[in-house]
Amino acid sequence: MNDIVSLRINADRYIRMALEEDITSGDISTNCVMPVYQKGQADLICKQDGIIAGLGVFKRVFSMLDKSVSFDMHVNEGDSVKNGELMAVVTGDIRALLSGERTALNFLQRMSGIATYTNSIVKLLEGSKTTLLDTRKTTPNMRIFEKYAVKTGGGSNHRYNLSDGVMLKDNHIGAAGSITKAIQMAKANVSFVHKIEVEVENLDMVREAVEAGADIIMLDNMTPDEMKEAVKIIDGRALTECSGNVTKENIKNIIDTGVDFVSSGALTHSAPILDISLKNLHAV
């Protein structure tokens, strides 16, 4: 299932939960000043340069509150936007526009911030063989939106959750007794269609993982020189991924190591929001 189809199928329950968090027994501020229906319009304005992601989620928040709401869109998903740019005009019941504003913007700002930060790192990797991946270090109940935003920004998704693939990290290896034993147990207990990824921390562990038949070897918190040596040792017998505090500031150190993938938790846990506002609300 591709990311956009998955988002459409699964997003509603999380959007509804976000609205329920913000509106438990009515929006008393809005009800005071707008007790009855009044059609209105508001402008969606970007206040910062970036990549826009989450327009569909933004619209769905309002359509849950007002089925007749309409959107005059001036930008498309994934577009580059500029500070001061008018991105859309939203028309609908003023009560819905007021009550849904914060939730809709929370999604749009967060997703656009992730897409923007991801895109900035993707550009740094241009010309290399390395693909940028996200991680499971996501905001609870926001994973589907945050991983979608990574894709919109030009990155790729690692496994979505614990059911997606085998990743044997330090504590799995400790529980099994060794890398070799952990891989043997994984091969004995998981379907052959699943690849087995193993996290390693030094070159001896790299050698053991290769000999034990790992499909993917994650080089965790290694220096660039260690990663280069690890790639030579692996010699194409497994895919390679590096991980460990990878950010926009240090990713250039990884470009020449020859790894296939680089995963960064910062894409989802440290990306700043993109500043976006819903302004100029007025009756029509």
Image (cartoon, grey):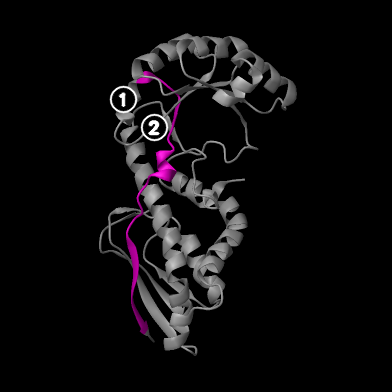
Q: Are marks 2 and 1 in contact (CB under 8 Å)?
A: no
Amino acid of disc 2: Asn
Kindly identify which numbered label has been placed on residue 245.
2
Quadrant of the frame with the C terminus: bottom left
Image coordinates of residue 134 in percent, x first then y, are 47, 38
Mark 2 or mark 1, which is nearer to you?
2
Circle 1: is it few (<14), some (14-19), or many (20+) Cα within 10 Å?
few
Circle 2: is it few (<14), some (14-19), or many (20+) Cα within 10 Å?
few
Q: Which residues are magenta?
A: 257-282
Q: Quadrant of residue 225?
A: top left
167, above or below 92, in the image: above
Q: Nearer the viewer, residue 37 or 41?
A: 37
- Tell me the residue at 61%/55% (across/down): 10
Cα–Cα gap, marks 2 and 1: 12 Å
42, above or below 267, in the image: below
**Mark 1 — residue?**
253
In primary-sequence order, the first of circles 2 and 1 is: 2
Kindly identify which numbered label has been placed on residue 215.
none
Tell me: 247 left or right of 17.
Answer: left
Is 1 colored magenta in this rendering? Answer: no
Q: Nearer the viewer, residue 129 or 161?
A: 161
Mark 2 residue element: loop
Image coordinates of residue 223 in percent, x first then y, are 36, 19
Quadrant of the frame with the N terminus: top right
